[in-house]
Image: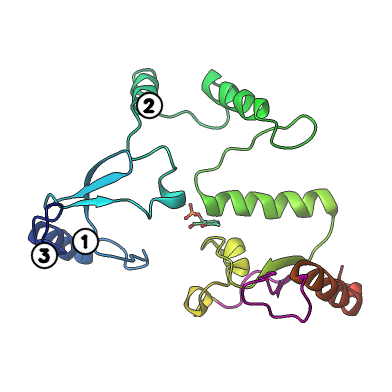
Amino acid sequence: MNDIHNKTRLPGPKARALIERDREVVSPSYVRDYPFVMSHGRGAEVWDVDGNRFVDFCGRNRRVLDGARHPAVVTAIQEAATRFLHISSDYWHEGQVKLAEAIRELDPVSGPAVSFFANSGAEAVEAALKLARYATGRSRYIGFLGAFHGRTMGALAFTASKYTQQARYFPTMPGVTHVPYPNPYRPLFAGDDQGRAVVAYIEQLMERKCSCR
Ligand SMILES: Cc1ncc(COP(=O)(O)O)c(C=O)c1O
């Protein structure tokens, strides 16, 4: 498609060349949905290396909703980088404390909250799994069919959005039972209240498996 936003057929020649180079040297385990090779972005718009311009409806969790390069975020990163680029989690620094204070101000849970900072979604999921086990002393978990939680071994045990994600990695972490997610649009259970139906299903499961709690 050629129009005022697209200067080439998609993907353009520079994008195709870079994807070829990538194929030689980058792990094929990255899942790419569409051959978009980014050059730069502004707000909700992104440009590829051939100068084609797109509206970004796909940034999602990979680029938070303040856009491609919000000036306040760019300035904060530049300012922090002039002081130091890395510090081990063995030590303290004010930026981490200030961020945790700001999160507590948002009042995310009732009562005083402390923050744990992770490098990725999967690492946050791993931390949550360990925290749940540590705090409850229980060994079993419930995951939802259709959900994506990441690709590290613990998170992968929960990920159930595509068969291919777990294929060839069995056995995954034991102790995870998947149940349907309540979906009023495509209901799996009888009745109007899919939420209650799923809770009843989980209770029945727990009765049958109570020796494993
Ligand atoms: C709901 C959810 N949890 C976890 C993850 C894993 O995050 P990451 O790719 O940063 O490890 C994703 C990533 O798409 C996600 O959408």
Label whose residue precedes the other's in the sequence (1 or 2)? 1
Q: Residue furthest front?
A: 192
Point out residue 93 in the picture as x, y percentages from the top left corner. Answer: 54, 21
Q: Which residues are magenta?
A: 170-193
Q: Residue at x 37, y 66 (%)?
A: 31
The reply to whether the magenta stretch includes residue 208 is no
Crowd class of label 3 (few under 14; some 14 to 19; many from 20; radius 10 Å): few
Q: Is 196 situated above or below 105?
A: below
Q: Nearer the viewer, mark 1 or mark 3?
A: 3
Q: Residue at x 47, y 50 (%)?
A: 61
Identify the amino acid type marked 1: Asp
Point out residue 23 in the picture as x, y percentages from the top left corner. Answer: 22, 66
Identify the amino acid type marked 2: Ile
Q: Is 93 situated above or below 59?
A: above
Between 158 and 188, the residue placed more toward the observer is: 188
Residue on which the image places disc 1? 22
Residue on which the image places disc 3? 9
Q: Nearer the viewer, mark 1 or mark 2?
A: 2
Q: Secondary structure at mark 2?
A: helix
Point out residue 135 in the picture as x, y percentages from the top left corner. Answer: 81, 48
Query: Disc 1 to disc 3, how far (Cα)?
Result: 20 Å
Crowd class of label 2 (few under 14; some 14 to 19; many from 20; radius 10 Å): few
Q: Left or right: 195 with respect to 151?
A: right
Q: Is 101 situated above or below 21?
A: above
Point out residue 124 in the picture as x, y percentages from the top left corner. Answer: 59, 49
Query: Disc 1 to disc 2, how far (Cα)?
Result: 28 Å
Identify the amino acid type marked 3: Arg
Residue on which the image places disc 2? 77
